[in-house]
Image (spheres, grey):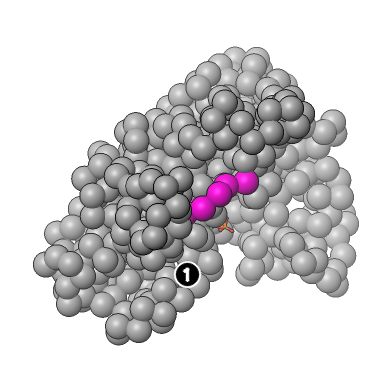
């Protein structure tokens, strides 16, 4: 490892990097080391021309014809098919639509419905982790409360307690594959297998997995999945999310958001809802076409490589970052919260510091953009499509300088968005 710990060695790694050309596909501002692609992915250069085309030609010139001629109506399915290989899904099983929160609601409602109409009819518990991203828990609690049939959400405090929590009352095990704060990656196949053995269904949130780590939903025999496109998939701010329903569950897939886009004949304008066949059942209403169209620019870049190459570089980047922080910033009160074990690590590295918020603010001021999550966690996301080994070196040198000189304002107030 020591031969790696110079800037020249990092530059040499960049020269050997099979993904190095893909950085040119992104518009990154000069002088910035962007380590927040886990929160908002960088902009694919192609997105500007794509937005221009959607606005000027498809909307401006072709007007309403574009629902057909520009394929707007089919866009959620077409993008879903393009995204599918990144998560081990098949054609006709994914749509890009709505938000992660909404998709989670639909998938969870469908999973409860499936159990209620099968051998799991009496089961009333949704098991998840207290450390899950809050909206996932809020949505599950909201659904449980509004169904008013005795459903409850059980929050588990550690990975070790998860297996026992999936008991004879558990209807759904609902987990986020990679934890947003710590970067801990669950063993999807093992936990899904355990859930099935106990008679529960497994619903996975891939918000920090899609485009970040290899995912094989079919190999894991997962039941449902949702995730974001604006994080590692670089779809753009607020870009629509995705939902995966495997073919084996599609015929029984039902949820309360029965909007006209999931109707068998949406333009018949008929009285009474009749669900369409297939993955269209996961749709609800009209989508933000402009945002949706830009998701494609992010997905296109992934088609020039594969998740194995991305994973290899991701682990090399996070290994290097951890090694450099621990050697260059030794003596400062930094604590690694991300697993060292590769199999358990996502594509981020998080460190605690008693003044984490202030140190992150100082880093951002110096052009190193990560983010801060309560409590005390500085989060650094690594996106192999555009993060270089020299970026890692530069980020750690600036962190070292800030810490050595105490150049942060410990009394700093928190902003609205961190
Ligand atoms: C980012 C993220 C979300 C975001 O949900 P939105 O509905 O897009 O706001 C949800 N869940 C997890 C686990 C996330 O990481």
User: Which quadrant would the N terminus be assigned to in this image?
Assistant: top right
Q: Residue drawn at (63%, 21%), measured in percent from left and top?
A: 22
**Taking 99 as reference, is 324 above or below it?**
above
Where ligand 1 lies, by image quadrant? bottom right
Q: Is 300 positioned to the left or the right of 114 in the image?
A: right
Name the quadrant containing residue 91: top left
Q: Residue drawn at (41%, 81%), measured in percent from left and top?
A: 145
Q: How many marks?
A: 1
Q: Is residue 291 magenta?
A: no
Give the residue pinned by disc 1: 139
User: Which quadrant would the C terminus be assigned to in this image?
Assistant: bottom right
Looking at the picture, tell me which residue is in the foreground, 390 or 6: 390
Magenta stretch in the rendered image: 282-288
Give the image location of residue 198, x and y in percent: 16, 64
Residue 175 visible to the viewer: no
Q: Is 392 positioned to the left or the right of 149 in the image?
A: right
Give the image location of residue 163, x and y in percent: 25, 66
Q: Is 117 positioned to the left or the right of 87 in the image?
A: left
Looking at the picture, tell me which residue is in the foreground, 180 or 363: 180
Q: Is 375 positioned to the left or the right of 271 in the image?
A: right
Q: Residue drawn at (83%, 43%), measured in percent from left and top?
A: 367
**Taking 54 as reference, is 212 above or below it?**
below
Judge the density around disc 1: few (<14), some (14-19), many (≥20) Cα neighbours within 10 Å. some
Q: Give the structural element (helix, strand or loop) at label 1.
A: helix
Give the image location of residue 340, x and y in percent: 47, 47
Give the image location of residue 344, x and y in percent: 41, 48
What is the chief secondary structure element of the magenta stretch?
loop
**Taking 203 as reference, is 399 above or below it?**
above
Q: Residue drawn at (29%, 55%), measured in percent from left and top?
A: 253
């Amino acid at each position: 490892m020591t031969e790696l710990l110079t800037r020249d060695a990092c530059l040499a790694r960049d020269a050997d990097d099979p993904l190095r050309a893909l950085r040119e596909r992104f518009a990154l501002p000069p002088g910035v080391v962007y380590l927040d692609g886990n929160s908002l992915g960088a902009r694919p250069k192609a997105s500007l021309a794509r937005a221009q085309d959607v606005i000027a030609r498809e909307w401006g010139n072709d007007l309403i014809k574009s629902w057909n001629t520009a394929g707007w109506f089919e866009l959620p399915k077409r993008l879903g098919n393009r995204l599918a290989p990144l998560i081990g899904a098949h054609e006709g099983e994914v749509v890009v639509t709505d938000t992660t929160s909404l998709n989670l609601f639909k998938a969870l409602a469908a999973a409860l419905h499936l159990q209620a109409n099968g051998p799991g009819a009496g089961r009333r518990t949704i098991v998840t982790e207290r450390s899950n991203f809050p909206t996932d828990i809020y949505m599950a609690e909201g659904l449980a409360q509004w169904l008013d049939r005795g459903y409850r959400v059980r929050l588990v405090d550690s990975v070790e307690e998860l297996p026992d929590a999936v008991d004879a009352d558990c209807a759904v095990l609902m987990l986020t594959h990679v934890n947003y704060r710590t970067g801990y990656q669950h063993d999807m196949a093992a936990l899904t297998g355990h859930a099935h053995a106990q008679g529960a269904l497994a619903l996975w949130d891939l918000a920090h997995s899609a485009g970040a780590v290899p995912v094989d939903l079919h190999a894991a025999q997962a039941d449902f999945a949702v995730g974001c496109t604006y994080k590692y998939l670089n779809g753009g701010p607020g870009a629509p999310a995705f939902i995966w329903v495997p073919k084996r569950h599609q015929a029984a897939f039902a949820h309360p958001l029965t909007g006209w886009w999931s109707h068998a004949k949406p333009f018949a304008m008929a009285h009474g809802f009749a669900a369409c066949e297939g993955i269209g059942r996961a749709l609800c209403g009209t989508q933000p076409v402009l945002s949706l169209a830009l998701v494609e620019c992010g997905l296109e870049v992934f088609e020039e490589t594969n998740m194995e190459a991305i994973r290899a570089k991701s682990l090399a980047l996070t290994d290097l970052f951890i090694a450099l922080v621990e050697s260059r910033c030794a003596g400062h009160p930094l604590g690694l919260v991300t697993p060292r074990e590769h199999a358990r690590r996502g594509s981020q590295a998080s460190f605690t510091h008693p003044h984490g918020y202030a140190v992150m603010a100082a880093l951002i001021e110096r052009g190193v953009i990560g983010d801060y999550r309560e409590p005390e966690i500085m989060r650094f996301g690594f996106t192999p499509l555009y993060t270089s080994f020299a970026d890692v070196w530069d980020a750690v040198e600036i962190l070292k300088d800030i810490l050595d000189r105490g150049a942060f304002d410990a009394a700093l107030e928190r902003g609205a968005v961190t």
